[in-house]
Image (tube, rainbow, N blue to C red):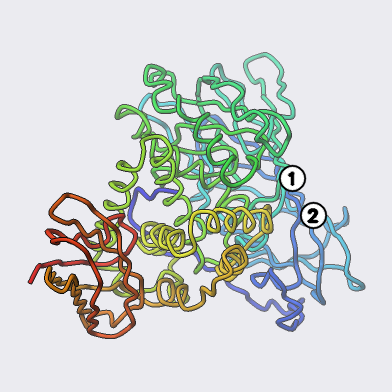
């Protein structure tokens, strides 16, 4: 995801006791991975929506398949404001509780079991499904759920810890040029003719995804097929079908940078693992973000297409999310960097692959400059921010740029081979499930044989970065190079390796590495040869630090 508009307040579900039923207490061990709704694991949503040709009033019918994994007698579903007309459990009507933000559904008593809960509901949607008329007066509907806005139009367990498959059945007045696109693959599309004809379109996503990625697009769009891409690198053991959908007037900007989409998917699939979904669609949309990585159906802002096309870096960023964030999802919001940091760094890796080392160093230098220029999140909060409760505020330089740079430093710390092996093993172990930072740490420790706890704590669990004054003095008589490193007090002292590119009078350059301890000042004497004329600190842009250098 790439933010576009200012942060908004998080919508927090209230757990009101209605006197009818209450959530049975469970132990921390019983809660397992689904702590947001202890004892409940949703496995599938079958969502049927009647969507108008104008306005925001919808009628919905959702069948939720779930497993009870602990002693729970009430299912709490998130749904804000919309009217609920009926609830059935295993096809039997039940009396349910309702607050302005939740539905409380009684579950049969007894052993752990699987249930089908059906909810009929409707009303005017205020968020989540963005209904608006475009500049040509055509009504469009785009899902826009991040972070917890699915609850404005879908009865759901609206949290990334609980992933499920989803089937969309959309019934809407039939109009020429109007398309319906959603997660997964197209199952069927049919409709009658006539002035009041209704079109029915069904899409199905067979891989479990969090609710914030469950979306549908209903709009006047035209489709450009990019063809069968990344053949042999799909989980479905075939090629990855890619398409671009745009408003008719934007047809002239295609394919633009989407001509690189095949190579981008192939690179990520070769680096990490097979592409995880049935297809990959790229859509012009009207939603909150500049780009949103919805599983198999990426939404890009309308503005990007109208201003000349989507950038290659944004396409790479949102495509990388299909692996990181989508297939492997952060189990809880403080670990958002496992999604946004990965997408940021893998977009830079695409730059390295497509444009070479110099361009990659330039990208990492710009990334570092962005972090150092931040006056809000980076100096004040850690990357793994367990205090912030307004989720939109997690879309900051910590989750994106600093998270991405931490991956870059991990790569330098363990080496290329161990880094990419560890990333592949992390992905393979948590694919179509969820993960925490500790899971990534375990995978990289296993691949490298190096302990990484102190590294993770320093860079992810404390704010800031080193601020360094580096001075050097060469003595040609003794063939030594004295290096002094002073760390400013603002963020405290950090421990890190400091690389130096040392150039002599003949123009020959060699790289030295100095282990800097977590102390205010460090002085080391290094053996050198020849007359030293220049010392470059961190020549490969592998350290997140503000660095000032001077010769003494």
Quadrant where the C terminus sits is bottom left
Camera-side residue of 323 and 183: 323
Q: Which residue is mark 2?
A: 65
Q: Residue at x 61, y 22 (%)?
A: 174
Query: Residue lying furthest right in this view?
Result: 110
Query: Residue lying furthest front in this view?
Result: 477
Q: Residue 168: give x, y in percent of width and height.
A: 69, 39
Badge 1, how many Cα within 10 Å: few under 14, some, many 20+? some
Q: Which residue is mark 1?
A: 46
- Measured Cα–Cα span from mark 1 to mark 2: 8 Å
* Dot placed on the residue nearer the N-terminal end, 1 or 2: 1
Q: Residue at x 79, y 74 (%)?
A: 72
Give left or right: position of 321 versus 32: left
Q: Quadrant of residue 369?
A: bottom left
Camera-side residue of 161 and 340: 340
Give left or right: position of 108 versus 101: right
Q: Are marks 1 and 2 in contact (CB under 8 Å)?
A: yes
Q: Residue at x 35, y 70 (%)?
A: 497
Can residue 13 be seen? no
Q: Residue at x 64, y 63 (%)?
A: 161
Q: Is residue 209 above or below residue 498?
A: above
Q: Residue 345: give x, y in percent of width and height.
A: 43, 51
For label 1, the SS is strand
Q: Is residue 226 above or below residue 339?
A: above
Q: Residue 430: give x, y in percent of width and height.
A: 67, 58
């Amino acid at each position: 995801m790439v933010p576009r508009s200012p942060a908004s307040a998080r919508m927090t579900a209230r757990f009101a006791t209605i006197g009818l039923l209450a959530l049975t207490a469970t132990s921390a061990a019983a809660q397992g991975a689904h702590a947001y709704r202890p004892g409940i694991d949703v496995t599938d949503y079958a969502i049927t929506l009647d969507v108008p040709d104008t306005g925001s009033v919808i009628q919905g019918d959702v069948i939720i398949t779930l497993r009870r994994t602990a002693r729970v007698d009430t299912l709490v579903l998130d749904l804000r404001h919309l009217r609920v007309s009926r609830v059935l459990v295993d096809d039997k009507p039940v009396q349910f509780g309702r607050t302005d933000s939740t539905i409380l559904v009684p579950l049969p008593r007894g052993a752990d079991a699987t249930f089908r809960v059906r909810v009929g509901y409707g009303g005017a949607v205020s968020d989540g499904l963005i209904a608006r008329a475009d500049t040509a007066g055509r009504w469009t509907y785009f899902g826009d759920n991040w972070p917890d806005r699915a609850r404005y139009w879908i009865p759901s367990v609206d949290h990334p810890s609980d992933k499920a498959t989803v089937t969309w059945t959309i019934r809407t007045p039939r109009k020429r040029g109007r398309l319906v696109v959603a997660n997964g693959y197209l199952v069927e599309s049919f409709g009658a003719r006539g002035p009041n004809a209704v079109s029915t379109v069904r899409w199905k996503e067979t891989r479990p995804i969090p609710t914030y990625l469950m979306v549908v697009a209903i709009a006047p769009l035209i489709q450009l097929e990019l063809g069968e891409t990344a053949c042999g690198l799909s989980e479905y053991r075939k090629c990855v079908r890619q398409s671009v959908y745009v408003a008719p007037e934007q047809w002239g900007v295609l394919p633009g940078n989407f001509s690189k989409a095949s190579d981008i998917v192939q690179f990520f699939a070769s680096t990490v693992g097979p592409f995880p979904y049935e297809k990959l669609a790229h859509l012009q949309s009207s939603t909150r973000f500049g780009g949103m990585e919805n599983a198999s159906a990426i939404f890009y802002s309308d503005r990007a297409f109208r201003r000349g096309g989507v950038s290659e870096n944004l396409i790479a960023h949102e495509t990388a999310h299909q692996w990181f964030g989508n297939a492997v999802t952060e189990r809880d919001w403080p670990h958002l960097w496992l999604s946004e940091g990965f997408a940021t760094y893998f977009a830079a890796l695409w730059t390295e692959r497509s444009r070479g080392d110099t361009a990659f160093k330039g990208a990492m230098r710009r990334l570092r400059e962005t972090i150092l220029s931040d006056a809000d999140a980076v100096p004040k909060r850690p990357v793994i921010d367990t205090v912030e409760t307004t989720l939109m505020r997690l879309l900051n330089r910590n989750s994106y740029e600093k998270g991405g740079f931490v991956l870059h430093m991990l790569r330098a710390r363990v080496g290329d081979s161990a880094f990419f092996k560890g990333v592949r093993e992390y992905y393979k172990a948590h694919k179509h499930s969820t993960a925490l930072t500790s899971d990534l740490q375990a995978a990289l420790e296993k691949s490298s044989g190096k302990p990484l706890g102190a590294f993770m704590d320093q860079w992810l669990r404390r704010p800031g970065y080193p601020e360094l004054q580096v001075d050097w003095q060469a003595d040609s008589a003794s063939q030594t190079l004295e290096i002094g490193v002073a760390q400013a007090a603002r963020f405290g002292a950090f421990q890190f390796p400091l690389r130096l590119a040392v150039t002599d009078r003949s123009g020959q350059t060699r790289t030295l590495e100095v282990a800097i301890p977590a102390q205010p000042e460090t002085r080391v004497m290094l053996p050198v040869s020849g007359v030293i004329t220049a010392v470059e600190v961190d020549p490969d842009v592998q350290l997140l630090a503000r660095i000032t250098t001077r010769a003494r």
